[in-house]
Image (tube, rainbow, N blue to C red):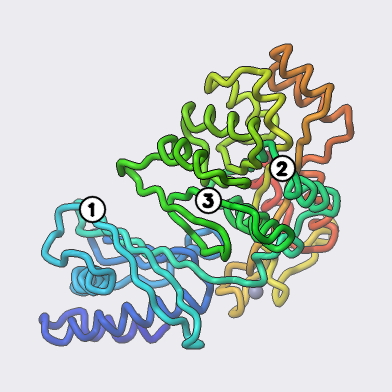
């Protein structure tokens, strides 16, 4: 049983006095543990019977604690104080942030707090951000050689559009940040602007602009006026609407290298999505240089992974080091589609998804599942993780 559980069960039945103090140390202990285990989010969820504390570890939620009801309110109150929120408003959603030093006492770890009222009480989620210098280099993200070389070549281009696709949490913004850093280093002095919602990590020598949700400055308005600031490289956090898509494509056609992300399951799907948004086929074919599709898979814990003799692949075990999840850290798989004359012709002829994918596979395109084979063979991840990431059983 962990320290938190013991403390809270002792204090749970008592009156308000000691509980306030208890919530303070509880919250700091929980957030400390979350940071140590590199959790991306901590969920404080009222269940009616108590409060469930869950950590998101490598993309998957894991229940860490069940706390008694008496503590729930004080815990949320403590989080609100730390994030500078209104403690007396329990009936509206609130969002705030706190910046704290990590355990080494040197680096600042940003934490974003969102509180939401539910019928069982207030629910809070703390999102944790880490500075991970090792992960910010393009060479170290885990791309296969061919894709890495293609990305570096695109980074040198003076115009065109590079699109990244994949679901939320597939590492797209980490890749974009790494490409921007690569450009900064390779071409010092280039004028680079990034529009983000929110700015997730600071990149030196890049003018980063935060586009707040529901604010007056939207992606299209910011993008339009930024183009008058003569940038050479532009990064837009995400293309969500037709207007942003249209301005982005025009920017890519008029002497800017533009990079962005888009929700789509496959590279060919991203092209079709642009067409659905009303972009003309000739604009798509002349502006898009490549579409990169990527996923993050959980990495097997090196201390407890087990060889499955039947399949020859490794499977997850569970030990103290990985908090019994069997996994530690994540690894990337990717596929890239570069537009050549055959694909351009097909887009201009209004080919559908199936036709585009047939062309791709006839050219020996390496898809996500094929890229993942190198990891399965080395025992880095499992078949289940691969199946989940590629959206089908393998
Ligand atoms: Zn383990």
Q: Where residue 215 sits in the image (x, y, percent)?
A: 31, 44
Between residues 28 and 65, which one lies in front from this camera angle? Answer: 28
Q: Where residue 281 sits in the image (x, y, percent)?
A: 66, 18
What kind of element bears circle 3? strand
Between residues 74 and 46, which one lies in front from this camera angle? Answer: 74
Q: Horizontally, is 241 left or right of 3 in the view? A: right
Give the residue drawn at x 34%, y 71%.
98
Give the residue drawn at x 84%, y 36%.
365
Q: Which numbered dot is residue 93?
A: 1
* Eye-nearest disc, 1 or 2: 2
Q: How far apart are marks 1 and 2 (CA)?
A: 44 Å
Q: Horizontally, is 331 left or right of 307 in the view? A: left
Q: How far apart are marks 3 and 1 (CA)?
A: 29 Å
Mark 2, residue position: 158
* Eye-nearest disc, 2 or 3: 2
Q: Which numbered dot is residue 1?
A: none
Q: Where residue 117 sits in the image (x, y, percent)?
A: 21, 54
Most distant residue in the top direction: 349
Instruction: Say whether disc 3 or disc 1 marks the residue closer to the N-terminus.
Output: 1
Between residues 249 and 325, which one lies in front from this camera angle? Answer: 249
Instruction: Say whether disc 2 or disc 3 marks the residue closer to the N-terminus.
Output: 2
Which of the 4 quarters of the picture holds residue 344?
top right
* Eye-nearest disc, 3 or 1: 3
């Amino acid at each position: 049983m962990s320290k938190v559980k013991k403390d809270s069960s002792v204090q749970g039945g008592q009156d308000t006095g000691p509980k306030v103090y208890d919530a303070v140390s509880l919250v700091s202990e929980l957030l400390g543990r979350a940071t140590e285990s590199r959790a991306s989010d901590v969920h404080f969820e009222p269940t009616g019977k108590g409060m469930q504390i869950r950590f998101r570890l490598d993309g998957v939620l894991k229940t860490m604690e069940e706390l008694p009801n008496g503590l729930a309110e004080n815990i949320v109150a403590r989080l609100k104080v730390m994030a500078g929120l209104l403690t007396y408003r329990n009936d509206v959603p609130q969002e705030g942030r706190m910046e704290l030093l990590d355990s080494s006492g040197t680096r600042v770890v940003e934490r974003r707090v969102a509180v939401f009222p539910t019928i069982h009480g207030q629910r809070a989620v703390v999102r944790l951000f880490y500075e991970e210098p090792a992960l910010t280099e393009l060479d170290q993200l885990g791309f296969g050689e061919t894709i890495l070389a293609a990305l570096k070549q695109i980074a040198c281009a003076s115009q065109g559009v590079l699109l990244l696709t994949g679901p939320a949490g597939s590492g797209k913004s980490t890749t974009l940040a790494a490409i921007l850093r690569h450009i900064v280093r390779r071409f010092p002095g280039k004028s680079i602007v990034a529009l983000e919602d929110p700015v997730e990590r600071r990149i030196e020598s890049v003018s980063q602009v935060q586009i707040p949700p529901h604010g007056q400055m939207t992606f299209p308005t910011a993008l339009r006026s930024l183009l008058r600031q003569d940038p050479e490289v532009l990064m837009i956090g995400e293309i969500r609407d037709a207007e942003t898509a249209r301005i982005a494509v025009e920017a890519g056609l008029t002497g800017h290298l533009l990079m962005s992300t888009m929700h789509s399951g496959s590279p060919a799907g991203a092209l079709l999505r642009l067409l659905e948004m009303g972009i003309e086929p000739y604009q798509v074919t002349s502006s898009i240089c490549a579409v990169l599709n990527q996923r993050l898979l959980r990495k097997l814990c090196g201390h407890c992974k087990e060889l499955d003799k039947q399949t020859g692949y490794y499977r997850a075990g569970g030990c103290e080091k990985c908090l019994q999840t069997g996994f530690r850290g994540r690894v990337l798989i990717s596929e890239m589609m570069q537009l050549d004359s055959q694909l351009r012709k097909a887009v201009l002829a209004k080919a559908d998804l199936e036709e585009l994918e047939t062309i791709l596979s006839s050219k020996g395109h390496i898809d996500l599942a094929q890229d993942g084979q190198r990891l399965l063979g080395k025992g880095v991840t499992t078949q289940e993780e691969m199946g989940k990431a590629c959206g089908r059983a393998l």
